Amino acid sequence: MNFRKNLKKDDFSALEWEQRVNLAACYRLVSQYGWDDLIFTHISARVPGPEHHFLINPYGMLFEEITASSLVKVDLEGKKVEQNEYDINPAGFTIHSAIHAGREDAQCVLHVHSVNGVAVSAQQKGVLPLSQQSIFVLSSLGYHDYEGVALRDEEKPRLVADLADNNFLMLRNHGLLTVADSIPDAFLFMYLFEATCMIQVRAQAGGGPLIPIDERIIATAQAQAAAVTKQAGGNLAWPALLRKLDRNNPGYDQ
């Protein structure tokens, strides 16, 4: 799909273009890993600079189609600040604008309706300490009760309060959300979140007794994560993920 031919890399600052490329790559990776829901979820990222602007997907494009220049730039009121023939998902704006406004460190907010994630979000006890992946999620996890499709501004303060200072948020009966100070970290967190849910659903399907992980191990999870990634977090895997995209779905950086 080709549109806005008048905009290209040179029309943006170097920092904004880098953010656009990484966000477009993130959309395509979410599609590649099978976490997308046609056109109905969303990932947003702050635009570097003093303005309160952020980038989000053009509503109507598949995640596998999104490019750096096709992303829609909006302000915290959801108004487009540059020409784009596409609108944005109103529910996406409600969720993302609330978190970007409430969390200064929320450089990227990633939300999916993955099948495993929704399945666990419908379970009363939520995420269980059953896997190595789960300890990283449980060390920074909040829950938000379902209030219908996220269209009402009155839900925003409850959403932000339930997220608190966590990196993971389970939206009950709805899906998964991660927040990070970079796009690579938000993606890594979602990888862990979805893997946690997939493992839990499969373990439960086995029908036998489950072995929970000791809470004392969960308490040290963040220190363990820093050691495993050499303090680099998602940035350690991000270049390899971009190489994977370059092989399988190039063009995100256009």
Image: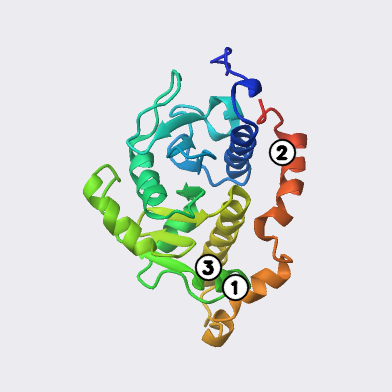
Which dot, 1 or 2, sits closer to the camera?
Answer: 1
Figure quadrant of residue 227: bottom right
Q: Are marks 2 and 3 in contact (CB under 8 Å)?
A: no
Q: Identity of the amino acid at label 2?
A: Leu
Q: Identity of the amino acid at label 1?
A: Gln
Q: CA distance from mark 1 to mark 2?
A: 29 Å
Q: Residue at coordinates 77% horizontally, 36% vertically from top-left?
A: 247
Is residue 99 at least partly visible in the picture?
yes
Which dot, 1 or 3, sits closer to the camera?
Answer: 1
Residue 120 in percent (x, y) is at: 44, 63
Q: Which residue is mark 3?
A: 137
Q: Earlier in the sequence, mark 1 or mark 2?
A: 1
SS at mark 3?
helix
Q: Earlier in the sequence, mark 2 or mark 3?
A: 3
In-image side of 44 versus 236 (left or right): left
Residue 22 in percent (x, y) is at: 63, 40
Frontmost residue, 43 versus 145:
43
Residue 102 in percent (x, y) is at: 37, 54
Q: Identity of the amino acid at label 3?
A: Val
Frontmost residue, 209 versus 178:
178
Q: CA distance from mark 1 to mark 3?
A: 9 Å
Q: Which residue is mark 2?
A: 245
SS at mark 2?
helix
